[in-house]
Amino acid sequence: MEAKQVFSNMAPYTPGKQIEDVKKEYGLDKIVKLASNENPFGYSEKVREAIPNMLNGLEIYPDGYAKALREEIAAKLSVKKDQLTFGCGSDEIIDMLCKTYLEKGTNTIMATPSFPQYKHNALIQGAEIIEVPLINGYHDLAAMLKAVNEATRIVWLCSPNNPTGSLISKEDLIDFLEKCPDHTLVVLDEAYYEYIDRSINPNSVALLNDYDNLVILRTFSKAYGLANLRVGYGIASEEITKYLNITRGPFNTTTISQLSALTAFLDTDFLEKTYQENITNKQTFMQFCDDVGLEYYDSEANFLFVKLPTSGDQLFTYLLKNGFIVRSGEALGHPNGVRITIGSKENMTELQELMKNY
Ligand code: PMP
């Protein structure tokens, strides 16, 4: 049975290599995964301690409204409770946005390379895709604005951008929002928000007061270390949120996910450790790259995209055989390079030794 026409040249998302598969393939005991920008320090001990108490009531459907988590986040961010939408990862919020705002006859604008799910979900809805190449790793905001027309429903801004790590400054963001017409949503995907250097943090949530067409995406998958539990959220006007919640599956986040996210959100010590270690280990790795003459993009995230003169596949395969999974640029729309998640100090030292001998 054939699916919609658009599926004829689409494929499922192919994630990076799995640890168990690599162990088997290369006969290795120890694998370090630096491929999906997960937290190398795991997650808050407080979540680990709290999970056994969450096991009662699994036969009952969860609270789809995620009341407790919603109240805490709304209070901390100083937004109304009905400005938040929770999803099975921010992946699901991206899907909800596409379902809500895109259809045949509309278009959507995104940088390339950027996070692939914008395009994937927009295609399924039949929208026209307008991709604007990055300039030296950064969004070309002027060209993106120029591409906006009557039929543009969503512009995706990924900041820090995956896979380059570049940040859109607060000034540039405001300028973009000022010039973007009201009929176009500006989706600011801040999956790596907690890693941004605090001295230059764009404090984007405050902009929601001035721009009704702004949607901000955040997640518990990265700095909070809960990728497996699948909780992301959108912050937007009450009107947009109302529509997103019509699209949302009724029980799309589980009680365990919501309460774990809540516990993680309250553990500011764990977040602080993650933030500090990432900055230190990223700086050390950048210094290493400088010393060996490797170029990279400026990154405000927990990964670095290392530029190479040839395909990233060779370095990727060499590292894989030696027990390190990174992400080849070939899989990310930027063939010449590899994206490497910043790991623990110990893992980064080992990685650097391997790269020296490459
Ligand atoms: N946005 C960006 C930029 C990402 O890198 C990711 C994860 N790779 C996501 C969204 C989705 O994250 P999640 O669904 O785990 O919240």
Image: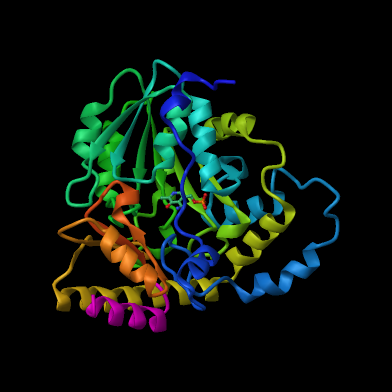
Please state which of residues 67 and 40 is positioned toward the viewer in this rendering.
40
Please state which of residues 171 and 125 is positioned toward the viewer in this rendering.
125
- Check the image and report above or below for 86 versus 28: above
Coordinates of residue 30 in the picture (x, y in percent): 49, 78
Give yes or no for residue 16 being in the magenta stretch. no
Residue 211 in view (yes/no): no
- Residue at horizontal 58%, vertical 62%? 226
- Residue at horizontal 32%, vertical 57%? 328
Q: Which residues are magenta?
A: 343-358
- Residue at horizontal 34%, vertical 54%? 160
- Residue at horizontal 60%, vertical 45%? 86
Q: Is residue 272 left or right of residue 336?
A: right
Q: Quadrant of the C terminus?
A: bottom left
Scheme of colours in the image? rainbow
- Check the image and report above or below for 46 versus 298: below
Residue 293 in view (yes/no): yes
- Check the image and report above or below for 248 versus 60: above
Coordinates of residue 349 in the picture (x, y in percent): 34, 83
Please state which of residues 116 and 301 is positioned toward the viewer in this rendering.
116
Please identify the residue farthest to the top as the structure is shown. 105
